[in-house]
Image (tube, helix red, strand yellow):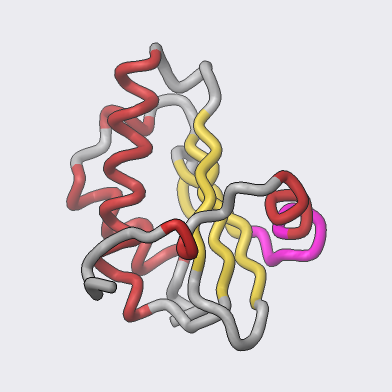
Amino acid sequence: MRPQCFSRRERLVEKRDFEAAFSKGRKKRANPLLHACLLKKPGKTARLGLVVSRKVGNAVIRNRVKRRLREIFRKNKEKILSGTDVVLIAKPGIHNCAFGELEKIFLFEILKDHV
């Protein structure tokens, strides 16, 4: 497997994984635009789950936000502790943020204690 890809093993896809992150994970409000739940599971790879509601915008905007957040995770996954499940919750207005600003929020506000 290529180290720079975003494989299926690195995605949160099942409802029970999201529920576990929401109920047992550490919640962080990094910004009015982006919130996160972090749950540590030893021995596994870091995984990402995204929640982008219709309040964020139409399908084009929601998909763009998801692509940006996935790319930020993919570029910085070696900085995240292995076994961490990260659920990012996008809030309305996030589509106005530049890519660099989102990356800064992700690295310095959400992951500052978890890298």
Work out whether 67 lies above or below 85. above
43 in the magenta segment: no
Q: Residue furthest top?
A: 58
Q: Which residues are magenta?
A: 21-27
22 in the magenta segment: yes
| x and y percentages locating residue 48 in the rendered image | 49, 57
Q: Residue furthest right?
A: 23
Q: Quadrant of the N terminus?
A: bottom left
Q: Residue furthest bottom?
A: 43
Work out whether 92 lies above or below 77. above
Work out whether 26 lies above or below 33. below
| x and y percentages locating residue 29 in the rendered image | 57, 53
Location of residue 28 by image quarter:
bottom right
Q: Quadrant of the C terminus?
A: bottom left
Q: Foreground residue, 50 or 44? A: 44
| x and y percentages locating residue 81 in the rendered image | 48, 83
Say which residue appears at 58% left-offset and 66% top-offset.
85
Query: In the rendered picture of this protein, how many numbered marks are placed on residues?
Result: 0
Say which residue appears at 32% left-offset and 21% top-offset.
61
Say which residue appears at 22% left-offset and 72% top-offset.
2
Say which residue appears at 19% left-offset and 40% top-offset.
98
| x and y percentages locating residue 5 in the rendered image | 26, 63
- Drawn side of residue 107 relative to residue 33, left or right: left
- Drawn side of residue 4 relative to residue 24, left or right: left
- Drawn side of residue 72 relative to residue 23, left or right: left
- Drawn side of residue 78 relative to residue 99, left or right: right
Location of residue 6 by image quarter:
bottom left
Work out whether 22 lies above or below 98. below
